[in-house]
Image (cartoon, grey):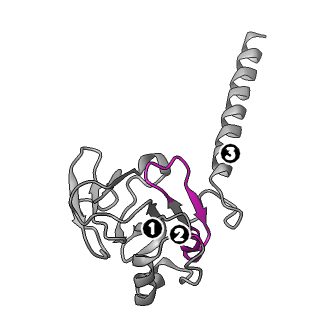
Amino acid sequence: MKRHQTLTAIAATLAATLLSVTHASAGGANADSGTATAPHCVATPEAVQVTCFDTFRKAISFASGGRINNAPTSARAAADDQGLQQRLASTKSASGYVIAATLYDYANYTGPSLTVWTPRPCKDGNGLDFSQDLKGIGWANRVSSLQPWANCWIKLFKESGAVEGPYKTNTPDVGNYINNRAVRIELE
């Protein structure tokens, strides 16, 4: 009897845990993506919630407040689109937020992406403007390439606190020292 009660308690705990994880994942989902783990995500610094989409175009449209709604569907194609890069560098959303950085899971701006938007542009490397912990949003140990926007320079930090950067321009490969090892970014 005691064993049955213990197994029942374990099963109930597992069911409650699974339900809370499923609920938390659904909370970050966008109606267009169907899942919180869709490949192209958008976050604000210190974000608790990340909104994800099934295409890069949808992520950029969301981050720009709908002002850029014709970006390429793939992040790789967007990296080569000079017109899009100029619009990303200068477009504010209706709320005044700007796209400050895009991080990519793989080299050469490929794979899943994380676009970080901030309440204002950065001040050109004169000290910390914004910080983003990548662990809490599922992006720790993933960054392989990046693009800074809105006058921002990007620094990547390892778990040990070691830093690489600042990256001031589009970077198709962050280098072996920090590749897939960043747990936090700073925008300056």
Residue at image location 44% in from the left, 59% down from the top? 119
Residue 163 visible in this rendered orientation of the protein: yes
Q: Which residue is mark 3?
A: 22
Magenta stretch: give its range.
43-65
5 vs 157, nearest the viewer: 157
Disc 3 residue type (three-letter): Thr
**Residue 62 horizontal/vertical position (percent):** 58, 68
Residue at image location 58% in from the left, 74% down from the top? 61
Label 2 residue SS: loop
**Residue 48 horizontal/vertical position (percent):** 52, 46
Q: Are marks 2 and 1 in contact (CB under 8 Å)?
A: yes
Kindly report the distance in space between the C-alpha atoms of the residues bearing marks 2 and 1. Answer: 6 Å
**Residue 36 horizontal/vertical position (percent):** 62, 56
13 vs 65, nearest the viewer: 65
Q: Earlier in the sequence, mark 2 or mark 1?
A: 2
16 relative to 93 in the view: left or right:
right
Q: Which residue is mark 2?
A: 93
Q: Which residue is mark 1?
A: 98
